[in-house]
Every structure is written in structure tokens, then in C-alpha cells.
Amino acid sequence: MTAKSVVVLDYGSGNLRSAQRALQRVGASVEVTADAGAAAAADGLVVPGVGAYEACMAGLREIDGERIIAQRVAAGRAVLGVCVGMQILFARGVEFGVETAGCGQWPGAVTGLDAPVIPHMGWNIVKSGAGSALFKGLDASARFYFVHSYAAQRWEGTPEAVLTWATHHVPFLAAVEEGPLAATQFHPEKSGDAGAAILSNWVEGL
């Protein structure tokens, strides 16, 4: 059987090589590139992201990433956002009082976590949504690796979306799955066997 092809979108942000290696370990054929044609043609597109929301959006716009994502989603072709790559899928992000427009695939804002210890860094359990494809076969005690100070803390989108929540003093969205578009606030590529299971489930669904 031919391996599923995955592009990790290179727009100057994210743990590109660690994401590539993690996806290769679960059997995908992976290319790291900013090329729109390759991103459109692949079975799956991974949008990574670390750092500031505003900087990630600036980098994404430089390679016309918003359009690449929008066209794939409109065509029903799989996209997976990771960490800030999840956050930029929402309509806007608010950091240090500055509001930045996001990709707008999902309504709502990404805002700062109101917690005594920031960033939220380390391992945490999640409460996966009923019918989740990403978390299929995973135990409720599975832990995932997070490092972030901001998150989507409310869901304003459609009721059909499968929502997975975590808590760091306050509840926040740890993952969202809606049609071809899925995203995780945690880093599956840094989350050991549980993260590998997430990526394997995603690749299997391509």
C-alpha cells in the first residue's frame, strides 16, 4: 500500500523537522515545504506553529498560507493545525492587548490563559469529545505535552464539531475536529506514544 503523502507547511514557524520525523514514524511520506502546489496535492497538510500569533500570521501570509488552508478545507481535504497552528485557524488572536486577524476557519478568539503559572508547560490529560477520530483507542489517562500561554477558551462554531478540552486553572480547547479540519493545542510530536497514536489516527483517516 502506498504511504499517505503529508506536507508540513514551512512558513518560518514551528518544529518542522520534529513534526516530519513523528509523521514518518507513523508511516506517512512527508515533505517540508512552502510550495502551494505540493501543499494542495498532498493527502494531508500539517500547519505547525510556535511563538507569537501575530508573527505566525505574518509568516503564513507571506506564502499565501491562508488561501492554501482555505482551499483545502473547501475541497474537503485534510488539514491538521498544531499549537499556534491551531490558534491561527480561529478568527482572531489577542496578545499583549494587540488583536490580530487569523485565518477565520473557526469563529472566536484566542486569548490569554488566566492562570497563576504561565506558560502552561508540561503534561496534561484531556477530555476527548464523543466520536473523536483523533483520540480513537486512547485511554482517558493519556497525557499530552503542552507549552502555551494562550488558547481558545470558548467554542462559537457549529455543534457538529468534536471538541476536546483540557484545564490549566481554566478550561480551554485542547483539540477540535470538524470535517477535514482538525487541530491540537498540544504537541503530538512531543507527546510520546499518545502523540504518535494521534498522528497515526490522523494519517489513517487521510
Image (cartoon, helix red, strand yellow):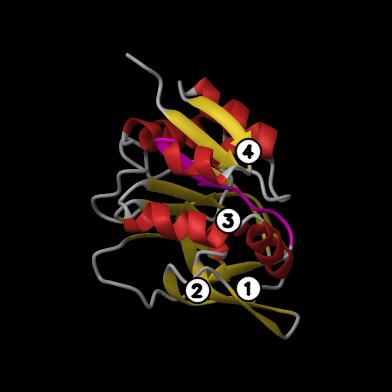
Classify mark 2: helix, strand or loop: loop
Residue nearest the observer in this picture, 3 or 188: 3
Classify mark 3: helix, strand or loop: helix
Q: Which residue is mark 1?
A: 113
Q: Which residue is mark 4?
A: 33
Tags 2 and 1 touching, CB below 8 Å = yes
* Span highlighted in magenta in the image: 42-51
Instruction: Of the two numbered discs 4 and 1 on the same chain, state the one appearing first in sequence.
Output: 4
Tags 2 and 3 touching, CB below 8 Å = no
From this view, report whether residue 18 is shown above or below residue 45. above
Mark 2 surroundings within 10 Å by alpha-carbon count, few (fewer than 14), some (14 through 19), many (20 or more): many
Residue 40, percent from left and from top: 45, 44
Disc ID at residue 153: 2
Residue 96, percent from left and from top: 76, 80
Identify the amino acid type marked 2: Gln
Q: Is residue 76 left or right of residue 80?
A: left
Instruction: Of the two numbered discs 3 and 4 on the same chain, state the one appearing first in sequence.
Output: 4
Instruction: Of the two numbered discs 2 and 4 on the same chain, state the one appearing first in sequence.
Output: 4
C-alpha separation, residue under disc 2 versus residue under disc 3: 16 Å
Observer-side mark, 3 or 1, equals 3
Magenta span has 44?
yes
Q: Main secondary structure of the magenta part?
A: loop
Observer-side mark, 4 or 1, equals 4
